[in-house]
């Protein structure tokens, strides 16, 4: 009868990943280990339970990347890749598949990570490396340790004269701090910033994500044309079209009319969409 450890091993092998350290048992917990070329290790645990008859004893599925000796690693030398609790009601097959796919993507993309590209640079606590903007690459994961926010660089371009422009997409919204109050759309659309090549950016040293594997960006349908009497609602503002121009009906004082191009940008520009997705209400 297969244990979760067996199924994890089989799943990783199907992705071409060898568990070079075999398995390790300690304190009733069984581990599957994967070595990375820089001398670091990933251990994943199955809590020594069988899928078919011992589900009640399954505490959870975990995968931790140890940046030091797994037996003596400090908290700041550990990166949690998977941490999921299981019980009798859990879908164990789905949980194992998700763990295997997470590990497979992590290991497969590791050669492109900052740690692999720049072994000469220091890695700080919790696997964070400070890189100057000029060394960033598409797929690097920017992290804000104070808030928990993580974003993947989808494009970076050298503009000349030491200036770079990067676009990134959020993969983990902040879990603490004032930015948690921002609308959900703020994290669903790309964000573009410009910096000098020497500006330091904190990235997750051992992680790299193929931007092409990220979920589709939920761009709204763009209206084909506007007519007088149409309304557009965006970020709690109501726009009304009359005589070929649009007027802000929410803030009526000191607001000048705008043209169709300005309203169309509400549907197409990432910066506007981060504030909220517009709704077009055609004239009756």
Image: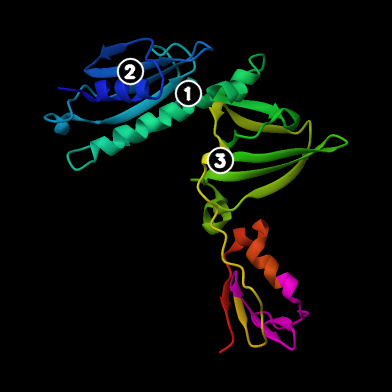
- Which residue appears at 66% of the width and 77% of the height? 225
264 to the left or right of 103: right
Quick one: 30 or 227, which is closer to the camera? 227
> Residue 153, position in %: x, y?
63, 39
Is 147 located above or below residue 246 in the figure? above
Q: Earlier in the sequence, mark 2 or mark 3?
A: 2
Q: Residues within 10 Å of mark 3 (few under 14, many from 20)?
A: few
Residue range of the region highlighted in magenta in the rendering: 233-262
Q: Disc 3 marks which residue?
A: 212
Q: Is residue 126 left or right of residue 87?
A: right
Is there a contact, CB below 8 Å, between mark 2 and mark 3? no
Residue 53: x and y in percent read 11, 30
Q: Is residue 146 visible?
A: no
Q: From mark 3 to mark 1, how far is it between C-alphas?
A: 17 Å
Identify the residue at image location x=74%, y=89%.
243
Q: Is residue 93 magenta?
A: no
Q: Nearer the viewer, mark 3 or mark 1?
A: 3
Q: Reply yes or no: does residue 249 show up in magenta.
A: yes
Q: Which mark is residue 152?
A: none
* Residue matched to label 1: 107
Q: Earlier in the sequence, mark 2 or mark 1?
A: 2
Q: Secondary structure at mark 1?
A: helix
Which residue extends farthest left? 53
Coloration of the structure image: rainbow
Labels 2, 3: front one? 3
Residue pictured at 70% horizontal, 83% vertical = 252
Could you tell me which secondary element the residue under label 3 belongs to?
helix
Q: Residues within 10 Å of mark 1 (few under 14, many from 20)?
A: many
Return the residue at label 2: 32
Frontmost of labels 2 and 1 is 1
């Amino acid at each position: 009868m297969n244990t979760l450890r067996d199924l994890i091993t089989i799943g990783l092998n199907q992705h071409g990943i060898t568990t070079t350290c075999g398995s390790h048992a300690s304190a009733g917990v069984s581990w599957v280990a994967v070595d990375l070329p820089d001398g670091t290790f990933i251990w994943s645990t199955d809590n020594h339970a069988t899928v078919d008859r011992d589900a009640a004893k399954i505490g959870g599925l975990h995968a931790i990347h140890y940046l030091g000796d797994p037996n003596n690693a400090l908290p700041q030398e550990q990166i949690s890749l998977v941490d999921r609790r299981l019980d009798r009601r859990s879908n164990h097959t789905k949980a194992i598949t998700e763990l295997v796919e997470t590990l497979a993507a992590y290991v497969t993309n590791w050669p492109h990570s900052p740690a692999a590209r720049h072994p000469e640079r220091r890695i700080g606590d919790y696997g964070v490396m400070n890189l100057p903007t000029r060394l960033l690459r598409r797929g690097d994961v920017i992290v804000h340790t104070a808030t928990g926010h993580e974003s993947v660089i989808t494009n970076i371009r050298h503009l000349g004269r030491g200036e770079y422009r990067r676009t990134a997409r959020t993969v983990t919204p902040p879990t603490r701090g004032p930015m948690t109050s921002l609308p959900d759309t703020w994290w669903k659309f790309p964000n573009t910033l410009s910096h000098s090549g020497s500006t330091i950016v904190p990235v997750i040293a051992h992680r790299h994500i193929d931007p092409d594997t990220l979920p589709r960006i939920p761009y709204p349908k763009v209206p084909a044309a506007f007519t007088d009497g149409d309304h557009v609602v965006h970020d709690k503002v109501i726009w009304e079209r009359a005589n070929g121009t649009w007027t802000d009906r929410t803030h009526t004082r000191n607001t000048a009319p705008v043209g169709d191009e300005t309203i169309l940008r509400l549907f197409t520009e990432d910066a506007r969409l981060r504030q909220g997705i517009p709704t077009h209400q055609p004239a009756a």
